[in-house]
Amino acid sequence: GDSVTQTEGQVALSEEDFLTIHCNYSASGYPALFWYVQYPGEGPQFLFRASRDKEKGSSRGFEATYDKGTTSFHLRKASVQESDSAVYYCALRTGGYKVVFGSGTRLLVSP
Amino acid sequence: EAAVTQSPRNKVTVTGGNVTLSCRQTNSHNYMYWYRQDTGHGLRLIHYSYGAGNLQIGDVPDGYKATRTTQEDFFLLLELASPSQTSLYFCASSGTGGPYNYAEQFFGPGTRLTVL
């Protein structure tokens, strides 16, 4: 079945550091890829999506590029802030109702 | 902005107890979902639905029933609750997102369930 792998369970950075969270997927069809962010005490919220090869999604300074060749959708941000501390989820959807989530990456940013 | 509400926000029950978690969305979305969230497992899909009266089985359905009574309302039922069902439960909804169905999901604030 379809799957999403996030290799980092937790990432600890200082403010203004560069962020990369890795996301790789496996899907039988041609999926849309998503990033969601979850702040403490809240439900996940949509960050952005990309639906075709080489498309870049972005929001709030975060970005990721859909790479069909390496089956990846890595999340990046040039300069993180303490307020970016949250759990980040990569997800895919292949055109049906079902959405598959990765296990999540907790980002801790210290001032 | 789509709105998804859940009730109750917190619930404590005993083993063998009967629990109903409620979810309502007010954005006329067709699709609704129930997830559980546990440390180390992320979000796992329990049941989902694409309209009133429809129910689809997710990845971790054992011990759960669900019912979609209207387009707005989706319920999760635990008829014989067990301690393994202690978790944080999220409801979500999404629209169609065009012919390829790539719409994002909108999540509720969650219900924390404890089974003693």
Image: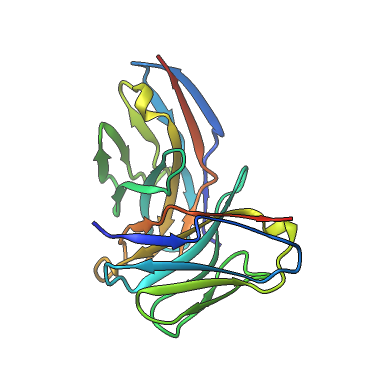
Q: Is residue B90 left or right of residue B13?
A: left
In this picture the colour scheme is rainbow
How many labels, in total?
Answer: 0
Name which residue lies at 29% across and 53% down. A52
Residue B14 vs residue A23, the one in the foreground: B14
Name which residue lies at 41% across and 69% down. B32
Up the image or down, A86 lies above or below B27; here it is above
Percent coordinates x, y for residue B92 in the rendering: 41, 61
Quadrant placement of the C terminus of chain A: top left
Residue B37 vs residue B59, the one in the foreground: B37
Quadrant placement of the N terminus of chain A: bottom right
Q: Is residue A97 visible?
A: no
Residue A31 lies in quadrant = bottom left
Up the image or down, B4 lies above or below B88; here it is below
Residue A106 vs residue A73, the one in the foreground: A106
Up the image or down, A77 lies above or below B83; here it is above
Residue B28 vs residue A28, the one in the foreground: B28
Percent coordinates x, y for residue B3 in the rendering: 30, 60
Percent coordinates x, y for residue B16 in the rendering: 75, 69
Farthest residue toward the bottom?
B53
Percent coordinates x, y for residue B76 in the rendering: 54, 70
Q: Is residue A79 left or right of residue B10?
A: left
Residue B52 lies in quadrant = bottom left
Up the image or down, A17 lies above or below B3; here it is above
Q: Is residue A15 visible?
A: yes
Name which residue lies at 36% across and 48% down. A45
Q: Is residue B70 left or right of residue B116?
A: left
Name which residue lies at 38% across and 71% down. B31
